[in-house]
Amino acid sequence: MAGAPRIEHLVTSGTFSLDGGTWDVDNNVWIIGDDDEVVVIDAAHDSDAVLAAVGDRRLSAIVCTHAHDDHVRAAPDVALAAGAPILLHPDDQVLWKMAHPGRRPDRPLADGDVLTVAGLVLRVLHTPGHAPGAVCLYAPDLGALFSGDTLFAGGPGATGRSYSDFGTIIGSIGDRLLTLPGETVVHTGHGETTTVEAEAPHLEEWAARGW
């Protein structure tokens, strides 16, 4: 028996570097699947920790919500060790090349793509703003959204650095994420989990405040 499909959570620590600055960060790594097969969302910082969490299960894909270096640092090493493909939206190639100039992602992600793992459906939602190729993954059977750095508990992802845009991220959140069922649990790229219902009332406030 493969056990019930489920969401597993790992936190890894390292740095994020862009535009000449470097910051210490803790990242959420999400693992979706059952006892036989899993998908990893954002192989961040520590390949050994990610591989240990996967264990002896088949890793069917490493899905990158975007290509900021903190989210993809460990992806090539995990892919090599597990024989799994790296999936990334092509609009984030410019950021990917900063982190891994000698290694390309294996497959493109596109809005509307459907990934499957352990009988679960993961729907790809292209949500640019924090990064041009940012995506979120919606798992309707789990009532879950994996939002990367597009939506956090309390506000949108940062847009103060290169290749980001505030108006674009507000549009992505309003059009693509806050239209999901209110009870959808939002599993973020950093920090605490939230829900669509908790964040939806604040969109106009964020837009007016400019963050």
Image (cartoon, rainbow, N blue to C red):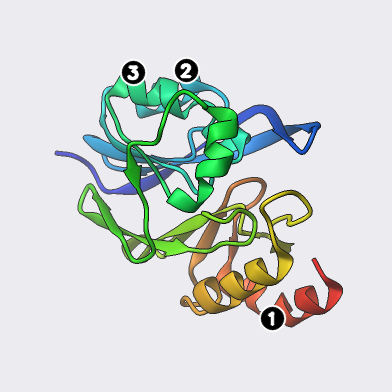
Which corner quadrant of the image does residue 59 belong to? top left
Tell me the amino acid under the disc marked 3: Ala
Q: Looking at this view, is 89 or 94 the one in front?
A: 94
- The residue carrying pointer 3 sits among few (fewer than 14), some (14 to 19) or many (20 or more) residues within 10 Å by Cα, namely few
Q: Nearer the viewer, residue 110 or 91?
A: 91
Q: CA distance from mark 1 to mark 2?
A: 40 Å
Q: Is residue 147 left or right of residue 129?
A: left
Q: Residue at x 62, y 52 (%)?
A: 149
Q: Position of residue 136 (x, y in %)?
A: 48, 58
Quick one: quadrant of the N terminus? top left
Check disc 3 and report its element: helix, strand or loop.
Answer: helix
The mark found on residue 201 in the picture is 1
Furthest toward the left, the residue is: 1
Say which label, 3 or 1, has the lower sequence index: 3
Residue picked out by circle 3: 81
The Cα–Cα distance between marks 2 and 3, rounded to whole angstroms, is 10 Å
Q: Which residue is mark 2?
A: 48
Q: Nearer the viewer, mark 2 or mark 3?
A: 3
The mark nearer the N terminus, 2 or 3, is 2
Quote the CA–CA distance across marks 3 and 1. 43 Å
Q: x and y percent of residue 43 in the render?
A: 48, 33
Q: Would residue 211 be seen by someone viewing this image from the given angle?
A: yes
Quick one: SS at disc 2? Answer: helix
Residue 113: x and y in percent read 31, 60
Task: Determine which of the numbered discs, if any, sits on residue 130 in the image.
Answer: none
Which residue appears at 67% of the width and 35% of the height?
A: 26
SS for dot 1: helix
Q: Quadrant of the C terminus?
A: bottom right
For marks 1 and 2, the one nearer the N-term is: 2
Image point 85% across, 73% down: which residue? 209
Answer left or right for 102 relative to 6: right
